[in-house]
Image (tube, rainbow, N blue to C red):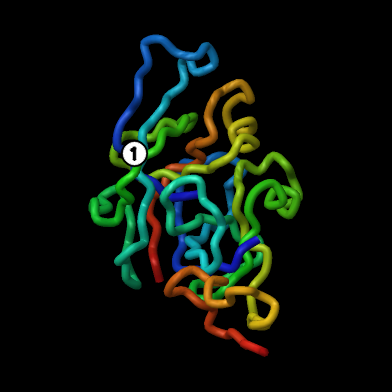
Amino acid sequence: MILAKVIGTVWGAKQCATLQGRRVISVRPVSLKGAKKGQRFGSDIPETYLEHSSLLAVDPIGADIGQLVLVSIGSRVRDLVTDPAVPTKHCVIAIVDEAILE
Amino acid sequence: MILAKVVGQVWATKKNPWLQGQKLLVLRPLTWFNPDHDCDHIIAVDPVGAEVGQEVVCCLGLPTRWKLGDERYPVEASVAAIVDFVEVYSGACAMPKFAFMKGHKPENIVERD
């Protein structure tokens, strides 16, 4: 699993039948580069602690833009939290309150 | 499985029911694990009871769910063991200096010829 910040929602006018009615969000993974002891990550995480790339994830939980989420990766996890017919490998499994580096 | 160092902890209220009561740790990988995206950390569930600062063996993928005892856990990383020390034979690895991620090395490492 990885930590990531929700940066937007993705809407498709024409989409795969199994994606119909599912929430797809765009997330940016957290980067620990430069993070020090005692660093606290919440929904107010500064942009310097985010990777430059983004990825899309299916969100069965309903995370809002700006929130920090836990993204699980893999087809088996997708089978378990959504549906085996959903064409994704990234699924949101939790909304993170905070993560603390000690 | 990879070697990793525990650097922090994660708290989440709204989560998948399978994660209820599970401790979530932030791990920094010490060995290469071929991630499919830019990522320098792993969040893993911890059934073992590892603490921040300790080095652990992290189990990735399908065996994670076997180890947790139920294939319905929606997770793909978990702590499998707490490391006491790592023994490396220089003759066993063609390029021992590449065995660990750049700038990261286990604390208790015994290098033998």
- Residue A30: x, y in percent? 36, 52
Which image quarter: residue A24?
top left
Most extreme residue toward the front is B94
Instruction: Please tell me which residue lies in front, B42 or B102.
Output: B102
Residue that appears at 30% across and 32% down = A8
Q: Amino acid at mark 1?
A: Val
Instruction: Please tell me which residue lies in front, A48 or A93.
Output: A48
On what subunit does the disc labeled 1 rest?
A: A
Residue that appears at 33% across and 63% down = A33
- Residue B22: x, y in percent? 59, 54
- Residue B38: x, y in percent? 41, 50
The residue singled out by tag 1 in the image is: A6
How many marks do you count on the picture? 1
Q: Is residue A62 left or right of residue B108?
A: left
Rendered view: B73 above or below B81: above
**Does the image show residue B43?**
yes
**Secondary structure category for the residue under label 1:** strand
Residue that appears at 29% across and 56% down = A49
Rendered view: B66 above or below B88: above
- Quadrant of the frame with the C terminus of chain A: bottom left
Rendered view: A99 above or below A5: below
How dense is the environment of label 1, judged by Cα within 10 Å: few (below 14), some, or many (20 and up)? many
**Does the image show residue B87?**
no
Residue that appears at 61% across and 21% down = A85
